[in-house]
Image: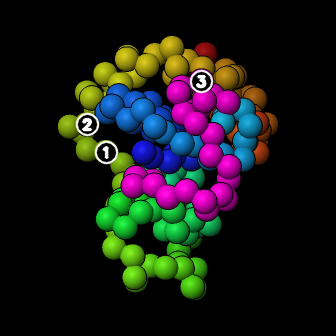
Amino acid sequence: MSWAPVPVGLGVVLALRALGYNDIHVADPNATRLTIAQSFGAKAHPVGDTSQRFALIMECSGAHAARNLGIELVLPRGALVLVGENAAPWTIEEGKVFRRKDFYMIRTFYFPVSDFEPNIELLRKFKDEYRVLVDGEFGLSALPQNFARFARGELIKPVLALD
């Protein structure tokens, strides 16, 4: 059982499926991304719901609140994998059960060159699903407004096309 927030989590859902996971729960406040995750075979998990615990949590947003929630939701002897980036210092919320819970916390933001070929294989295996993620193509002149739309969560994976 695993839990993966998106949009980076959309790729994580596909990677988990390729590894044989079939009970994947996804939480995302963006309904469009959640619908895409469900089309990839994931189950919706209400954002902020603490009624269920998971052995594997892939925190993909980088949001400190989501990381703190991950600490709360991970089962003892489970793993919390921090995939999403955040440059701001992270302080674990006071009162969180951290010291009394035995679990692994793994930080992973980049992959080594040796992972390049397996990633290309993953893209090929799920090419139709990945095509769904590209929801806009635009030229350089439209970069500012499309980047703003992406930052607001209105676009999943826009592509900059240079002539």
Residue underneath mark 2: 115
Earlier residue among tags 3 and 2: 3
Question: Where is mark 1, residue-wise?
Answer: 111
What residue is drawn where x is 67% and y is 59%?
48
How far from the left and from the top, in percent, is residue 153?
A: 73, 41
Name the residue furthest left: 114
At numbered mark 1, what does the secondary structure look like: helix, strand or loop?
A: loop
Residue stretch in magenta? 35-57
Q: Residue 114 location, x and y as percent?
A: 20, 37
Q: Quadrant of the N terminus?
A: top left
Q: Counting other residues with Cα less than 10 Å from the Cα at mark 3, is it few (<14), some (14-19), or many (20 or more)?
A: few
Q: Is residue 55 left or right of residue 72?
A: left
In space, the residues marked 2 and 1 are separated at their CA atoms by 6 Å
Q: Quadrant of residue 94?
A: bottom right
Assess disc 2: are there few (<14), some (14-19) or many (≥20) residues with their C-alpha within 10 Å of its C-alpha: few
**Which residue has dot 3 on it?**
39
Residue type at numbered disc 3: Ser
Q: Nearer the viewer, residue 44 or 142?
A: 44
Residue 7 appears in the figure: no
